Amino acid sequence: MNLLQNIPAGLQAWLQDAVIEENREGMTNASVFRLERRDQPDRYLKIAARGSEDDLRDELSHLLWLQGRLPVPEVLYWAEDSERQYLLMSAIPGVVLYDEALRDQLPAVIRVYAAGLRQIHAFQDCPFDARLDMKIAQAARRLHANQIDESDFDAERQGRTAQNAFRELLDTRPNSEDPVFTHGDYCTPNVLVDPGSLSLGGFIDWGRAGIADRYQDLALAARSIEYNFGNKWVEPFFHAYGIDDPDPAKVKFYKLLDEFF
């Protein structure tokens, strides 16, 4: 909670009388806090080091562009000082897709997961570029800065070096891209649904959004399904999305690309 001791004056009113709970889920190094106040909707506060790999400016600009286009958090407050950035957002109602309460409804969960991705991919144009020229250059910068956590590699790459994985990335780069607007990290923790009706609540964590190949999202969704529900649900997900013959090379490539982020 030390991060909350010297917050900007404009943010203090939002925290007054709030029950504050740190959210430790997710892979980001940014600090995330849930704010609960009586008779008011819940909110989330993200705090990140300015200029770090968790810099919040991309997420801010993506969220502002997405207002009114997709069900995403509303930006309530933004500030940065010489050290940190502060992003206050409304909470999306619902539970994450891997919530235990939904385990007996997996066929419907998979359909909602696929429908949500179709909704995102329906946008063919946006001002943010996340195509391979940009992403591979970004991956190279992170590699040379020793920012790749090899211990966090997926099971099939455990024991390999980041340099070795990067060579494979360059060697297996697809010859073409099918560009759509992508979430960038379309995993089950980033999709929320109503636990009763299973209606889509919305999407969170937009820091990596932009125009990219649709397999950027499809591959990470498949990986998240394998991890949370089992491999047998991957094929129904692709079918519900509208692909009966997925490209295994692209799925493998975009999973590999994600090791660098």
Image (spheres, rainbow, N blue to C red):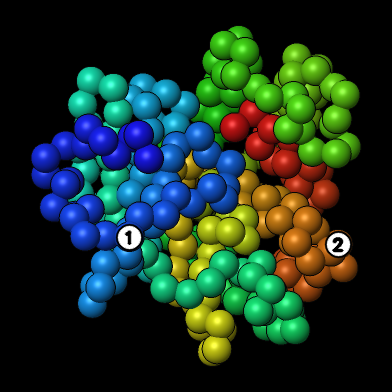
| Residue at 55% from the left image edge and 30% from the top image edge | 135
| Disc 2 crowd, CA 10 A, few/some/many (<14, 14-19, 20+) | some
Q: Is residue 199 above or below residue 49?
A: below
Q: Quadrant of residue 243?
A: bottom right
Residue at the farthest top position: 144
> Can the viewer see residue 157?
yes
> Can the viewer see residue 140?
no
Disc tally is 2
Identify residue type, mark 1: Val
Q: Are marks 1 and 2 in contact (CB under 8 Å)?
A: no
| Residue at 37% from the left image edge and 27% from the top image edge | 49
Residue 149, percent from left and from top: 68, 25
Question: Which is nearer the eye, 181 or 63?
Answer: 63
Question: Which is nearer the eye, 163 or 195?
Answer: 195
Q: Which residue is mark 1?
A: 19
Identify residue type, mark 2: Asn
Q: Is residue 165 above or below residue 201?
A: above
Question: Which is nearer the eye, 38 or 205?
Answer: 38
Element on which disc 1 rests: strand
Q: Quadrant of residue 197?
A: bottom right
| Residue at 33% from the left image edge and 35% from the top image edge | 3
Between label 1 and label 2, give the one nearer the viewer.
Answer: 1
37 vs 128, left or right, is left
| Residue at 62% from the left image edge and 55% from the top image edge | 187
Residue 80, percent from left and from top: 22, 31
Element on which disc 2 rests: helix
Question: Which is nearer the eye, 13 or 232?
Answer: 13
Q: CA distance from mark 1 to mark 2?
A: 39 Å
Give the numbered dot on residue 231.
Answer: 2
Lower sequence index among marks 1 and 2: 1
115 vs 90, left or right, is right
